[in-house]
Amino acid sequence: MISDSQLLRTENFWQGNWYGATQRFAVTNPATGERLAEVADATPAQAQQAVSAAAEAFVSWSSLSAAERSALLLRWHQLLLAHQDELALLLTLEQGKPLAEAKGEIVYGASYVQWFAEEAKRVYGDTIPATSADKRILVLKQPVGVVTAITPWNFPNAMIVRKAAAALAAGCTFVVKPAQQTPLSALALAELALQAGIPAGVFNVLASSDAQGIGAVFTQDPRVAKFSFTGSTAVGKTLLAQCAQGVKRVSMELGGNAPFIVFEDADLDAAVQGLMASKFRNAGQTCVCTNRVYVQASVAKAFSQKVQQAVTSLRLGNGCDSKVDLGPLIDDAACRKVEALVQDAVAAGANLICGGQRQSPDSLFYLPTVLSKVDDRMAVAQQEIFGPVLALQSFDTEDEVLARANATDYGLAAYFYSRDIGRIFRVAEGLQFGMVGVNEGIISNAAAPFGGVKQSGYGREGSKYGLDDYLDIKYLCLGGLG
Ligand SMILES: NC(=O)c1ccc[n+]([C@@H]2O[C@H](COP(=O)([O-])OP(=O)(O)OC[C@H]3O[C@@H](n4cnc5c(N)ncnc54)[C@H](O)[C@@H]3O)[C@@H](O)[C@H]2O)c1
Ligand SMILES: O=C[C@H](O)CS(=O)(=O)O
């Protein structure tokens, strides 16, 4: 039972303390509709208090040595792994993904904490040959200061720690508003940060139904140095504009429209396996899910038959059932969006091979769906589906499919399968995306720079580049040394 969980927290956390609110909002299980908890509904005034706590804590936190910050992050990492099962259960109950995926998310999120605990000790500066003998040029890297963040519901643990770990490692302090649908995972992270000994005011969490009000504080409070957002491109644009007023540092991890290209020289079985992983993870609710499938005409029929066989074997149900592959969508609005995209595609001439409706009229379970004879003019090929719908198209030539794959405002992830080394380099270099999977459908990991181009945002999370988003470069010119 969730009420037995030691990590079930329903009050907000800042300055090392838990705070209630005059209002509360309900958190429900998308698989059952069951009310899981009533969470304190943070206000903009409380967001300002949390920013004050972060600003106060920044002085001491940034003064710690990198080794001291690293040790505290590693303790947090250990606690995340020690509580993996409990964290995963909270995550599945509030978000819906199968428990196995939720456990994977906890390990994935914790890997960023471990990664940046190590990177904290590698924030290097420079000495640069001066233009005259009486001068010395030094370059320092210093933490930007207070970081605020807003994160989505689809990875309620990993999207927070992927930011917080880098921010804290750099010496910044951090205040996050999780998605209203999934606050419990975020508040559990705060509990474990507290247990890890991370000082008061360094890591702060405010759950709220007033996203706009909290967002106004996070993007416009003059004490905030940087704002980091993960979510839809539409909301990202709004928040980016709000940050412009104070010329804040910004990272944007936004929407995607990933092409998945299967060339005739591909290993078709490997391509099917990669497509299933990329398309149906989290019931298709990830920013890097395959959104468009392009199969070279000469292998289109064989590939489509293999895909249909794989999709019809998927099991849809409550994520707490270990036999389930796909959980529910997050809410009714998400279901209605997917229904509209499928109906629009069929009306425009696509073939519905399987699925195409909810498991039952009022449920949030949407059947795994395959559409064929899709074309690029359809909304299902132009919009982020964010559901378990696989849209098949065919193509003839490499140049044609590269042009079609790039014909989108998004630029997050892309995938293709080929065993021709010349083609691999031509296509990998020609795809206008931040991340490209070559003969691989799952590409996210802490060692790699995660992020997009075009309207999928900017900044990178993870990798040796991930700290740059939280550091300022300072140039020292030492004169009079002649
Ligand atoms: N690029 C990435 O790393 C990445 C990762 C996960 C999800 N996403 C994207 O996120 C989207 C799905 O998540 P979502 O539905 O939660 O996205 P969303 O943009 O609707 O919401 C994201 C967050 O923004 C908040 N928010 C919404 N409107 C706001 C406003 N006006 N002011 C302040 N905050 C506001 C929400 O409460 C939530 O916490 C998809 O587009 C997906 O591609 C991107
Ligand atoms: O939804 C977006 C996440 O970033 C997906 S991943 O787990 O990082 O690949």
Image (tube, helix red, strand yellow):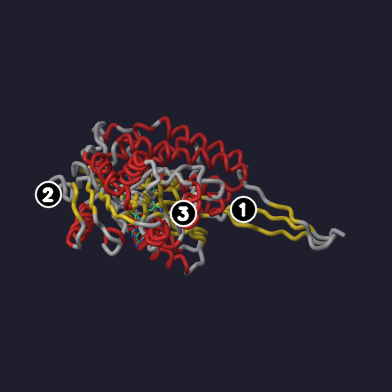
Spatial separation of the CA atoms under disc 2 and disc 1: 55 Å
Which residue extends farthest bottom?
245
Q: Please give the residue where the numbered disc 3 appears in the rendered image.
A: 427
Question: Secondary structure under badge 2?
Answer: loop
Q: Nearer the viewer, residue 337 or 343?
A: 343
- Between disc 3 and disc 1, the foreground one is 3
Which residue extends farthest front?
298
Residue 361: assigned label: 2
- Between disc 2 and disc 1, the foreground one is 2
Question: Secondary structure under badge 3?
Answer: helix
Contact between labelled residues 1 and 3, with CB atoms less than 8 Å apart: no
Question: Secondary structure under badge 1?
Answer: strand
Instruction: Tell me the kind of residue under disc 1.
Output: Gln
- The percent position of residue 27, horizontal first and vertical second, equals 26, 46
> Is 316 situated left or right of 205 in this image?
left
Q: Is residue 45 visible?
A: no
Q: Please give the residue where the numbered disc 1 appears in the rendered image.
A: 142
Question: Which image quarter is the C terminus in?
Answer: bottom right
What residue is shown at x 56% (from left), y 56% (from top)? Answer: 144
What residue is shown at x 32% (from left), y 40% (from top)? Answer: 91
Instruction: Tell me the kind of residue under disc 2.
Output: Pro
Seen in the picture, residue 126 relative to 213 is either above or below; the reply is above
Q: Earlier in the sequence, mark 3 or mark 1?
A: 1
